[in-house]
Amino acid sequence: MRGINVCQIMGNVGADPEMRYTAVGRAVTNFRVAVNRRWRDAEGQLQEKVEWFRVTTWGRLAEIANQYVQRGSPVYVSGRLETRSFEGADGQIRYVTDLVANDLVLLPRGNGSAPAGAESEVAEEEELEEIPL
């Protein structure tokens, strides 16, 4: 049986991308994406948790990400999860999981002078309040 490793996220970029080239000249760009989750707890209070994803893009997609993605950009990313290990400065083995992207879509920021994502956050909160518990 063949396995499935697919991850899709939609959120806001947390810092400007960092691009570099491998020894053979292949472009690789890394950036982080924050994905917010909102819910109401048992007391009816609105709760929020932010999950951070490390995203890695390769080749032409890496060049595009480096050129167009910037801190605060809303993005949709699809790809596979990949875990790697490394030895830290203290000699301990560390593990890092990246979303290796094969699809990247820059999403619209909203209109007017509102900060990026501000309108969508308000809309999401209003939608939550309308949902009966």
Image (tube, rainbow, N blue to C red):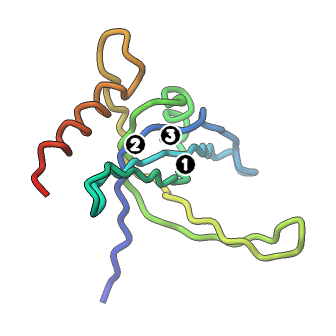
Residue ID for mark 1: 58
Is residue 11 placed above or below 115 in the rendered structure?
below
Q: Which residue is mark 3?
A: 60
For label 3, the crowd category at 10 Å Cα-Cα, with few meaning under 14, some 14 to 19 and many 20 or more, is: few
Viewer-proximal residue, 40 or 123?
40
Query: CA gap, disc 1 to disc 2?
Result: 20 Å
Q: Position of residue 123 (x, y in %)?
A: 23, 32
Name the residue type under label 1.
Answer: Trp
Badge 2 crowding class, 10 Å Cα cut-off, few under 14, some 14 to 19, many 20 or more, is: many
Tell me how far mark 2 sits from mark 3, CA to CA: 22 Å
Look at discs 2 and 3 and give the one toward the viewer: 2
Mark 2, residue position: 11
Task: Tell me what residue is drawn at x 37 percent, y 47 percent.
Answer: 103
Q: Amino acid at mark 2?
A: Gly
Q: Residue furthest top?
A: 113
Q: Name which residue type carries label 3.
A: Arg
**Residue located at (65% from left, 38% from top):** 18
Horizontal and vertical percent for residue 10?
A: 35, 46
* Tags 1 and 2 touching, CB below 8 Å: no
